[in-house]
Image (cartoon, rainbow, N blue to C red):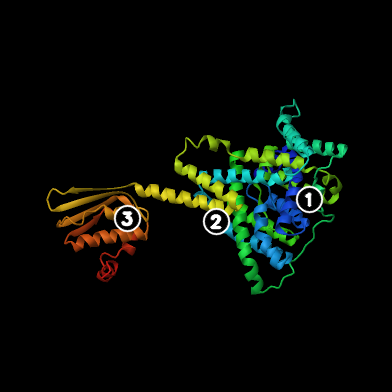
Amino acid sequence: MFRSTRQDWFSNIKGDTLSGTVVALALIPEAIAFSIIAGVDPKVGLYASFCIAVIIAFTGGRPGMISAATGAMALLMVTLVRDHGLEYLLAATLLTGVIQIAAGYLRLAELMRFVSRSVVTGFVNALAILIFMAQLPELTGVTWHVYAMTLAGLGIIYLFPYVPKIGKTIPSPLVCIVVLTAVYMLSGMEIRTVGDMGELPDTLPVFLWPDVPLTLETLRIILPYAIMLAVVGLLESMMTATIVDDLTDTPSDKNRECKGQGIANIGAGLMGGMAGCAMIGQSVINIKSGGRGRLSTLVAGVLLLILVVFFSGWVSQIPMAALVAVMIMVSIGTFSWASIRDLKKHPMSTNIVMLATVAVTVLTHNLALGVFVGVLIAALNFANKVGNILYIGAEDAPEGDHRIYRVVGQVFFASSERFGNAFDFKESVAKVTIDLSRAHFWDVTAVEALDRVVIKFRREGSEVELVGLNEASATIVDRYAMHNDPAAVDKLMGG
């Protein structure tokens, strides 16, 4: 345990501290923007980002991943805040945390194994596009100074790492923010800054119990929102954890991450903050800037609060162009460019899953819906492929008037019709043997198909024998088959 703690917290102190500083600066305008989207005071998003980042640093299952207030969660809060106010949002945030903790104990993170690589790639590409699109308002209808500052920021980000000695030591996004802020303060040019996004808080967060009646009516109001927030938050967190696993080539405990997200959201709700989850953009910034351990997440959260409360005068001077440059770097680094090259090499079905995930996510701005569509298409494609791997051969036995059918493959809802159509019921034989030693029956639909085959043969006067059923198939056939029940046979055949 001591070794694990040392690895998670103290194996990369310098890199985690510097990367956490970059993340803290980048979190400020996003937290304010997400608060505006949700229709609440900027303090709500900033306090939430601080609480969630600090708590998840201790409770999360993925070291180096950044969690805070997010746009995906903010979009789900708009109606609740508009119709019922902030207090009900805080109550929904607490319930969201409880649901996520329960999901962790129920090990629902194991469902991630049903998300194919093409869905993950589509998710990543969609998020990269959304991150870039989110910067466009800052680059629309502005003076040339903004474009110049943004291009200069990108130049610093991509060229500074080549500077001898210090280029690999100091994160280039941090250098970009510091240099462009200094240029803005010295030149006095008219461009948007962090201070123009909204008022920064001047006090520390305090314990705040939601002022709502503890009644079933309150539960009826907040439960649908809490469920949506919990699902979207866990989905985005699990997907982000998978991406960070790949970037760092290290594993993570996703069930612990579910519990950690829940605890963090409860903490945020009790401190006047809104629900949040993992942020792929900030997590990529952290990893690209050298962050690897829990210390980077803790530094990001603590420094965020220190900056906005005690150094708001300086922070408000950061030009948005500097942060836009950092986020453009994130979108470029997040997008899987290899997926474009692989379109020609990968099967069409894989490409369709990836592109559908991207399209639905970008068009709806709903990460959960995009992933759901991708998983659904991938599942249907898999079922279709497995359903087509079914062979049924027929041969006559040496004794004559006896036909043997040999079934090879998987019989389930997608292949049951093909299974039923493979037998010749018009040819009258005294005995039919169906050899199922190389077949597997998966569901009730498959058993019903077998029932129909047996019943049709018997109706033609043939004796039917089933041989070779494996133990699992025999269990489901014995439990649900009806071909030996006269009443059930009559009902099945429409009698």
Most foreground residue, 8 or 383: 383
Residue pointed to by mark 2: 108
Residue 240 image point, x, y percent: 61, 47
SS label for mark 2: helix
Local crowd size for mark 3, using a 10 Å CA cut-off: few (<14), some (14–19), many (≥20): some
Q: Pick whichever of labels 1 and 2 is earlier in the sequence.
A: 2
Say which amino acid is labelled 1.
Met
Residue pointed to by mark 3: 417
SS label for mark 3: helix
Asked if the residues shown at circle 1 and circle 3 are in contact, with their CB atoms under 8 angstroms apart, the answer is no
Q: Could you tell me which residue is drawn at 52 percent across and 44 percent down?
A: 354
Q: Could you tell me which residue is drawn at 66 percent across and 57 percent down?
A: 75
Local crowd size for mark 1, using a 10 Å CA cut-off: few (<14), some (14–19), many (≥20): some
Q: Quadrant of the C terminus?
A: bottom left
From the viewer's perspective, is the residue at label 1 or at label 3 nearer?
A: 1
Residue 417 image point, x, y percent: 32, 55
Q: Is residue 5 visible?
A: no
| Residue 184, quarter of picture | top right
